[in-house]
Image (cartoon, grey):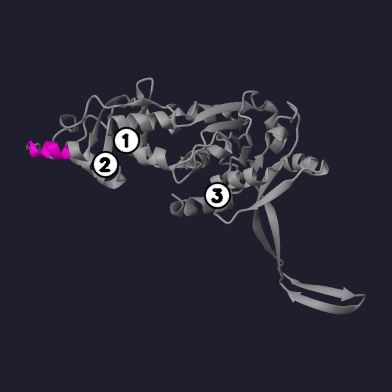
Amino acid sequence: MSYEWKNLLLTPSSTILDALAIINKESLKVALVVRQDHYLMGVVTDGDIRRGLLKHLSLSDSVSMVMNTNPITAEFDTENKVLIALMASRSILFIPLMKGGTVVGLETMQGVLSKPIYENPVFIMAGGFGTRLRPLTECCPKPMLKVGGKPILELLLCRFIKAGFKNIYISTHYMPEQITNYFGDGSAWGANIRYVHEETPLGTGGALGLLPTDIPTLPLIMINGDILTTVDFERLIDFHNKYQPAATMCVRDYEHQIPFGVISGDGHRIIKMQEKPIQRYLVNAGIYVVSPDVFRNVPSQKYIDMPTLLEQQIAKKQDVLMFPLHEYWLDIGRIDDFNKAQLDIKGLV
């Protein structure tokens, strides 16, 4: 689901004009009529509206007078090939996804035909205290701070889902209930979310040792939960699969301008002067791909940071590669970063 399906929702008290406005705005030719608890009452297409108007209904009439009260639906975890076969056999271009009688998504024929599905696990680190963002984080874990009206963690989750990654694992520590209560099992986003909890902080890499034993034996994408980015996760995993290193670290350019003239000399003799030179580095972007051989061998309950874990692989003569990022990237670690994110998000959604 590469769109915000919740924008398609109407209530039984909505009018035909309301349905027409949603269909026109979202360009999916369909709207979903639901109760407050997201129980599906019916669907409305542009064809339903045309047929209603031909019967002399008014745009101010209730949407219930034109909606299909017995639409074709599927369970939220139905495989893509089954959805394709179902939509083809019934000559429909969309299908509401259900869980326990309530709507949790919408899939389209174009969507299931055009996007790849990755079984690779995604591990989001969301247990930090966010001390540099106090007082904002005194009552809220940093990944749950809202940027553009949504938690940072939700923005990150939606990026992965749009790229075709559904197996999500989230590491928690600080105020974990705010995260688990908000996201639940992930079905409302069309994902499968599982949690690991750090009783004590285990560093940026230690939580890998808490992952369940039944996690898919595929390269794992690991990312800090306070990052706002448009990185192409599909290209990242394809890069890792091509070279098959022990791990891949995403890096980005970082420039630092020295605010003074820099002097180079030989004894008392000045050899060279540079006025406010700019130094350029490649820095760790907090996004990694880790092979199963690495993450499955991280001891449980052992503190270790990711740089240390990767240095251990390098010491063993294992390949650790870098993947340069050219897309938007922001580590929301300070108040200034948080304020910048509020402005930047307008150009990212």
Identify the main secondary structure in magenta: helix
Q: Which residues are magenta?
A: 49-55
Q: Is residue 19 left or right of residue 305?
A: left
Which amino acid does the dot numbered 2 rest on?
Lys
Taking the spot 67% from the left edge, 39% from the top edge, the residue there is 290
Q: Earlier in the sequence, mark 2 or mark 3?
A: 2
- Of 90 and 18, the residue lying toward us: 90
Secondary element at tag 3: loop
Residue identified by numbered label 3: 231
Identified at 81% across, 77% down, the residue is 272
Residue with the mark numbered 1: 94
Number of other residues with Cα within 10 Å of mark 2, as a class: few under 14, some 14 to 19, many 20 or more: some
Seen in the picture, residue 55 relative to 229 is either above or below; the reply is: above
Q: Residue at x 59, y 45 (%)?
A: 238
Q: Is residue 90 visible?
A: yes
Residue 254 percent location from the top left of the image: 66, 59
